[in-house]
């Protein structure tokens, strides 16, 4: 199964918490752990990795902590993955340069795998932290009638995410057949 690691998933969650502050402020490891419910050692490890790769700024001292090193619109999912896990790779033979593969030279799916790998890589490069945060804001109306676009029913959101999108809807998790808020 193709999955984003927990470390990357948690890294995105922590970065989203940092980006949500307006005005921006310094976040301590303990505060972020408390806000997210993640263990302090895990949060510390992730924040250090993100700071080492220039995604976060790190400040020492009693008032120290972390802030985004650049705007959320400039932090890509690919950069987060690289900072925490290394290059975005589906399989060894689909990366540049071609990695070791015992079937090299006789494999018939190298080219299709490279196409898939490039597509995933491109989506990760195009998707920013700002994009991810925007998808969680209350502008995607799931027809709950409250008028603000926010879904108040977790089952409704799950049902929407588990079904294929309507043909005319550009939202990746929307399954509504009728036009609604984000179609306007």
Image (cartoon, rainbow, N blue to C red):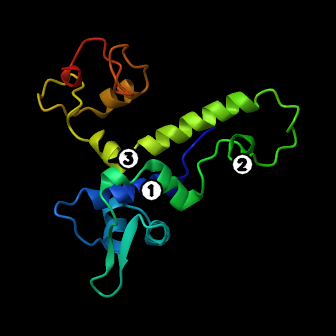
Determine the image quadrant of residue 131.
top left
Find the residue positioned furthest to the left: 147
Q: Earlier in the sequence, mark 2 or mark 1?
A: 1
Rendered image: mark on residue 97: 2
Q: Residue at x 48, y 55 (%)?
A: 79
**The N terminus, quarter of image:** top right
Residue receiving disc 1: 10
Kindly indicate whether the residue at mark 2 contacts the one at mark 3 (C-beta within 8 angstroms): no
Q: CA distance from mark 3 to mark 1?
A: 15 Å
Position of residue 82 measured from the top left corner of the image (x, y, whole percent):
54, 56
Nearer to us of marks 2 and 1 is 2
Q: CA distance from mark 3 to mark 2?
A: 26 Å
Q: Earlier in the sequence, mark 3 or mark 2?
A: 2
Give the tally of numbered discs.
Answer: 3
Q: Residue at x 24, y 25 (%)?
A: 142
Image height check: is 20 above or below 119? below
Residue receiving disc 3: 128
**The C terminus, quarter of image:** top left
Position of residue 64 measured from the top left corner of the image (x, y, whole percent):
31, 81
Element carrying mark 3: loop
Element carrying mark 1: helix
- Left or right: 31, with 146 as reference point: right
Position of residue 47 measured from the top left corner of the image (x, y, whole percent):
43, 68
Q: CA distance from mark 2 to mark 1?
A: 29 Å
């Amino acid at each position: 199964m193709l999955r984003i690691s927990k470390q990357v998933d948690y890294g995105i969650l922590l970065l989203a918490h940092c980006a949500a502050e307006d005005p921006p402020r310094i976040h301590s490891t303990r505060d972020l752990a408390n806000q997210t419910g993640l263990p302090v050692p895990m949060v510390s490890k992730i924040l250090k990795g993100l700071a080492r790769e220039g995604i976060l700024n790190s400040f020492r001292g009693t008032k120290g902590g972390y802030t985004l090193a650049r705007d959320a619109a400039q932090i890509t999912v690919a950069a987060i993955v690289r900072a925490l896990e290394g290059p975005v790779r589906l399989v060894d033979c689909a990366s540049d340069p071609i990695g070791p593969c015992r079937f090299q030279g006789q494999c018939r799916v190298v080219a299709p795998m490279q196409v898939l790998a490039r597509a995933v890589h491109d989506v990760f490069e195009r998707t920013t932290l700002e994009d991810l945060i925007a998808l969680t804001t209350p502008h995607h109306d799931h027809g709950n009638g409250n008028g603000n676009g926010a879904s108040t029913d977790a089952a409704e959101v799950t049902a929407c995410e588990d079904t294929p999108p309507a043909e005319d809807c550009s939202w990746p998790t929307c399954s509504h057949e009728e036009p609604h808020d984000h179609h306007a």
